[in-house]
Image (tube, grey):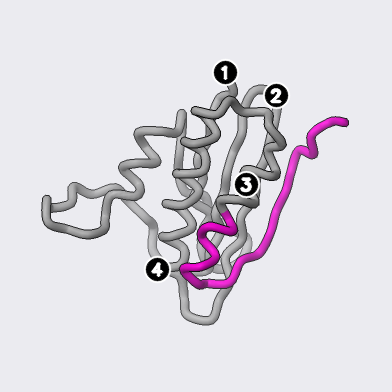
Amino acid sequence: MPLEPVHKRQFARDAGEVGRARDFVAAALGGIACAELLADIRLCTSELATNAVRYGPAGRDFLVRVVTLHDTVRVEVHDTGDGCPRTRAPRHDDDHGRGLLVVAALADEWGVAERSGPGKAVWAEFVLR
């Protein structure tokens, strides 16, 4: 059975939904990624979803899209929050602020895209090896 090229699901802006988003992405991939790559994809999904929960507007959901094309998996997390996320150098005693550094280290590419409505989509791409 061929893999669906696009999967998407809305999640509530709640910390408990981060794990559900991570599991959704893993299920959408249906075993096409090796265990090590899947672990990286799951971790990056957690970081992006956590940012959507932490910085997105109260009462608004976030959307996770998984796109597969040839040898690439792209995970997108859409939210309606203002501002453009960026990496920063956290202080050693900060308890947050490392998520995008993790994504940059694990993903083959990552970035931010505009949406047709308010907010943005933060994405990470992984080449299937």
Query: Residue 126, percent across and down?
Result: 53, 30
Mark 2 element type: loop
- Asked whether 17 falls inside the magenta stretch, the response is yes
| Amino acid identity at mark 2 | His
Mark 1 vs mark 2: which is more N-terminal?
2
Q: Which residues are magenta?
A: 1-21
Frontmost residue, 54 versus 21:
21
- Residue carrying label 2: 70
Question: Circle 4 is placed at which residue position?
Answer: 55
With respect to residue 2, does 103 lie above or below?
A: below
Say whether marks 2 and 4 touch (CB < 8 Å). Answer: no
Q: Few, some or many C-alpha atoms within 10 Å of disc 4 (few <14, some 14-19, many ≥20)?
A: some
Tell me the residue that label 3 is attached to.
25
- Distance (Cα) linking label 2 and label 4: 33 Å
Query: Going from the N terminus, do you reach mark 3 or mark 1 first?
Result: 3
Q: Disc 1 vs disc 2: Cβ atoms closer than 8 Å?
A: no
Q: Quadrant of residue 6?
A: top right
| Image quadrant occupied by the N terminus | top right
Task: Between label 4 and label 1, give the one nearer the viewer.
Answer: 1
Q: Residue at x 58, y 56 (%)?
A: 21
